[in-house]
Amino acid sequence: MIKLDHAISAPVVHREHHRDADDDRPRLECGVCGVWGGEKDEGSSIVALGLHALQHRGQEACGIASVNVDRFHTERHMGHVGEAFGGSDLPKRMPGHAAVGHTRYSTAGGSFLRNIQPMFADLDTGGIAIAHNGNLTNFLFLRNQLVAEGSIFQSTSDSEVILHLIARSRKARIVDRFIDALARIEGGYALVAQTPKKMIGARDPLGIRPLVLGKLGTAHVLASETCALDQIGATFLRDVEHGEVVVIDEDGLTSLKPFPARAARPCLFEYVYFSRPDSVVNGRSVYGVRKRMGHGLAQEHPIQADVVVPVPDSGVPAALGYAHESGIPYEMGIIRSHYLGRTFIQPSQGARQLGVRMKHSPNRSVLEGKRVVLIDDSIVRGTTSVKLVRAVRAAGASEVHLRSASPPILWPDFYGIDMPERDQLIAANKTMEEMRAFLEVDSLGFLSVEGLYRAMGETGRDASAPQFTDHYFTGDYPTRLLDREIEEGGRELTNRQLSLLVSA
C-alpha cells in the first residue's frame, strides 16, 4: 500500500479533448509501430511505412525515434505521416536499424507538440523511447503523486508517467524497470519501447488494446494492427498476448509473463469501428466480423426497402452483410470525400452546417424515389446522423430506415477512446421512439449485444465472465477507474479514503 502523509487534492491535470462541436464520431486512440534489426539505417523508413497503414488510428500528429548504436534521433510533427516522414532523406535524418513510431489522436493531455510521441528520456541506463496506445485509468493519481515527490513533467500525456515510473525504479536491468512501471499502471495499453540494445513490447493484462508481432527478414516488428505488417511486407507471427512482455535484442525474442494470469477481454470497438477492415485482430478478420454484424442486423431488424446504403467508409462491410442477408440491393448512395483536411476553415455556422455534405455527398441517381436502409457502424450523439438523413431525403428518398451495426452506446470509455460523457450520448438519454423522432427516420434499429457477440463467433455474452470489453454498451467496466473515482469523490480526499481506493 502507498504511504500517504497528507490529504491529496483532486487532480490538477485534466483530460483535454479538442473536437468540433459537430464532430460525432468516436475518435480513434493511437497507433504504434516498432522495428528491431534488419538493414542499417532502414529502421525509420520501415516504421514510417507502418505508421502510414495505421494513419486511421490517429490523424492529429505523428512521431518517430530511431536509434543508431547508442544515439537517438527523434522527430515529432503535427499532421499526417506522409507529410512528416515521406521524404527520401529520412534514413539520413534518422539513421539506425531500430526505430519506434506513433500516430496520435489525443485522448489524454490535449493537442500540443509536447504531447506527441514517442516520449524520450535519458536514464542512467541509457536512452529510452516509448510509444503508447491506450489510456491509463490511474494516470492523474500517479502523475500528481510523482509531482508531489519531485518529478518534473514536460507534457500532460499519460505516457510520460510511464517514463517517470521506469526512471524511479530501483531495479538494475531496464526490462525489470519496465515491468516495475507496468505493475503500477492501470487501464488499457499497448506499449513499444526502444533502448540502444533492446525493443520491448507490452500489452495490458486484459488485452484491451491490440498489439501484433511480425518478422521482416531478420528484423522483428511490433505494430497495433496486421495491416501495418502487410504494408511493409512483414510476416505475421502472432498476437502479443494479454499481460505479456516481449523483449527483442541481438539474442532474439524472449517472452515474459510477469503478472498473474487473467482471462482476456479485448475491446469490441476495434471490430465495430477502429481497426482497418483488412486487419486481423486477435485471430478474427475485422472485415468478416463487420459483415456478420450486418447479417445479424438484417435478421434482428428487417424492413421492406429498395436499396441498402452504407455510411462510408466504416459502414460498408455491415451494409454488404445486411444486403446479402435481406436480399435488398446494395448501392453506393453516399459518396465520401477523402480530400477534406482537418484544417479546412468553416468560418460561419451556416458553412459548418454544410460540412457533412463536403464529407458525404448523396448520390441522387441511387436515392431518388427509393425506400432506403441506411447502415452506420454506430450512433454516438446523433448529430451527424440526422444531417445525413436530411441529405438523403433531400436527394429524393421516399423513406429512410436507419440501422446501427453496433448496440446503443450508453456509457463513456476510459481506455483510449474519446467518447462524449453520458449526458451527451443519445441512446443514454432518449427512448427508442425519441431517438427515431430526433433522427427524423421512418424506423430505427440497433444490433443487440448478443447479436454482436454472435458476429464475433460466440454463442452469446457470458454475463458472469464477459469475453470482451463492452462497457460502452453494458456499463460493465473491466477494471476499476481510479481517476474517475477520485474525481467523483470531491475536491479533497483524506488519507484513509484515498488509501482504500488505492488498495482496493
Image: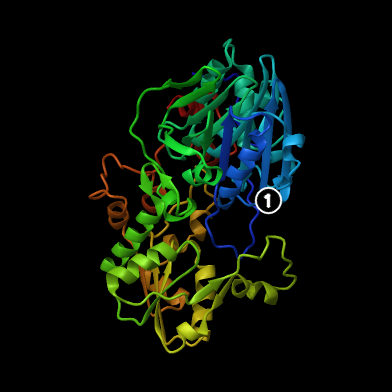
Q: What colour scheme does the image use?
A: rainbow
**Front-lying residue, 269 or 85:** 85
Asked if residue 326 shows in the view, the reply is yes
Residue linked to disc 1: 82
Which residue is at 48% across, 60% downward? 425
Q: Is residue 44 left or right of residue 189?
A: right
Q: Residues within 10 Å of mark 1 (few under 14, many from 20)?
A: some
Asked if residue 431 shows in the view, the reply is no
Q: Is residue 296 left or right of residue 58?
A: left
Where 277 sits versus 109, above or below? below
Where 304 sits versus 284, above or below? below
Q: Secondary structure at mark 1?
A: helix
Residue 129 screen position, x and y as percent: 65, 29
Q: Quadrant of the C terminus?
A: top left
Which residue is at 44% across, 64% downward? 315
Q: Is residue 100 left or right of residue 205?
A: right
Q: Is residue 411 left or right of residue 90?
A: left
Residue furthest left as drawn: 459
Where 364 sits versus 349, above or below? below
Looking at the rendering, which quadrant does residue 237 occupy?
Answer: top left
**Front-lying residue, 11 or 390:** 390
Q: How many marks?
A: 1
Residue 1 screen position, x and y as percent: 48, 18
Residue 373 screen position, x and y as percent: 39, 76
Which residue is at 36% across, 47% downward? 284
Residue 153 screen position, x and y as percent: 71, 30
